[in-house]
Image (cartoon, rainbow, N blue to C red):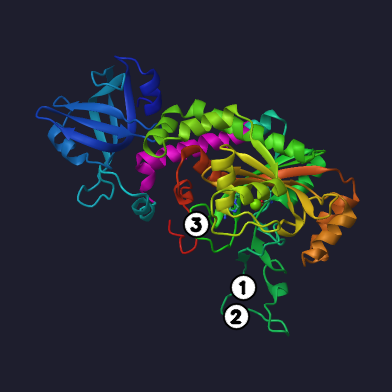
Amino acid sequence: MPTTRRIVDLLRHGQPDESVTIKGWVRTKREQKEFSFVEVNDGSSLAGLQVVVNQEVPGYAETIKRINTGASVEISGTLVESPAKGQRVELKAASIAVYGEADPETYPLQKKRHSFEFLRDIGHLRSRTNTLSAVFRVRNAASTAIHQFFQERGFLWVHTPIISASDCEGAGEMFTVTGFDLKKVPLTAEQGVDFSKDFFGKHAYLTVSGQLEAEIMAMAFSNVYTFGPTFRAENSNTSRHLAEFWMVEPEMAFCDLEGDMDLAEAFLKYIFKYVLETCPEDMEFFNQRIDNSVLATADNIINNEFARVTYTEAIALLEKASKTFEYPVEWGLDLQSEHERYLAEEHFKKPTIVTDYPAKIKAFYMRLNDDENTVRAMDILAPKIGEIIGGSQREERLDVLERRIQAQGLDLAEYWWYLDLRRYGTVPHAGFGLGFERLVQFLTGMSNIRDVIPFPRAPLDVEF
Ligand code: 4AD
Ligand code: MG
């Protein structure tokens, strides 16, 4: 049996007269009198391969009836130079095997453009469309770039747990993991749930971040990163929030906030460059069909330094803005997405790093500044998206950390191991978290986060 060739390889390097076999799904069929054109796509590239099927193919009339849009086929034949523009070669079929037909009366993907809302309802089929397949190729390239970036720099990839007993962000937005029979949940004397009788012997959750465990590993390996799913039970039905999303979290020992920001900036530049180089057709497609600033944005990221301002400076800029905001601007309040977008999109017109936020709106683990009022936090705000990265220098001083945990109403005893890291060989260290889906939105210009992950999980949304 001849080896199957990937369509992307044939489009790029295939030579006339080569005998090849392809396998894939029919995108379109155009029947002429004597022959038909069939476009086959195997997911390896945006463009499919055009196949010319003529009467010499055994069982022509019967076969051509069976291969409608959506059908799966194996086609062997010879590559020939293509007279059509935009493709070097096409395939002259010698034989066709149909694996599975697709009834044209019921197959939901028609040739016309479908809305992304409609495509979300057919999540099991939408990856066969141009846009979603381009998104998932870019997603794959960005993942590869992430590993390559860290591996080139000697970072160890560590696997942090998905089930956790601690709330890293202290925001209480966690999904419970339980082994209880929900009809007979044991109660304590105070009528609370008695988690000591649960599977793990205490209240367990799906993790919101791998950071605390990454800090443990950084205290042994110096530079580490995680790349895995994280979960948030915040009930936000927005185009930038998911209940399950992927996060990349580097953590570096012997590093301060400047080093953290420099790494984050180099990291984003690296990913954009890698994706442009490895997925040029897909990126061109996004620029043409989704958002005509995609390529300019990529160029801007790669070639310009990010803006850097403190939170206090950012508040002053927002107060001076001629724009009216829906949410109040006031020192001490968190920045809302409209504020973040104003800074990155309208004021600086490039990614903007905001540092030194008020301590009381940030997590307990961020290093307290000498003013005792602000912490060494940094958020990277992207045009159109807002916060894409959140990071900080960590509080490495035991006494300060204990105070901060208590000030936020958290239980010191729960963090015993985290505090131990400050007892034994503590060092200044820093890290950040990149929301991977927000990055893919940033790369592709896709406006809804549910369209950059194959199977989105969001409030009332867990099909597929
Ligand atoms: O800012 P966050 O909450 O930071 C942390 O979790 C830190 N522990 C990271 C660290 O320092 N190691 O989340 C990091 C990023 C955000 O900037 C955002 O891009 C993304 O994760 N994110 C979400 N993405 C999609 N859906 C959600 N519900 C998200 N919540 C946060
Ligand atoms: Mg954040």
In the rendered structure, which disc, 3 or 1, sits on the residue that comes first in sequence? 1
Q: Nearer the viewer, residue 316 or 296?
A: 316
**Residue 418 visible in rendering:** yes
| Residues under numbered marks 1 and 2 in contact, where contact means CB atoms less than 8 Å apart | yes
* C-beta proximity under 8 Å, tags 3 and 2: no
Secondary structure category for the residue under label 2: loop
Give the amino acid at mark 3. Thr
Q: Give the amino acid at mark 2.
A: Lys
Task: State which quadrant residue 332 falls in.
Answer: bottom right
Measured as percent of width and height from the top left, residue 190 is found at: 72, 84
In the displayed structure, would residue 14 be above or below residue 97? above
Q: Main secondary structure of the magenta part?
A: helix
Q: Residues in magenta?
A: 124-148
Residue 32 painted magenta: no
Cβ–Cβ under 8 Å for marks 3 and 1: no
**Relative to 123, 212 lies left or right:** right
Classify residue 293 by image quadrant: top left
Horizontal side, residue 367 vs residue 281: left or right: right
Quadrant for the N terminus in the image: top left
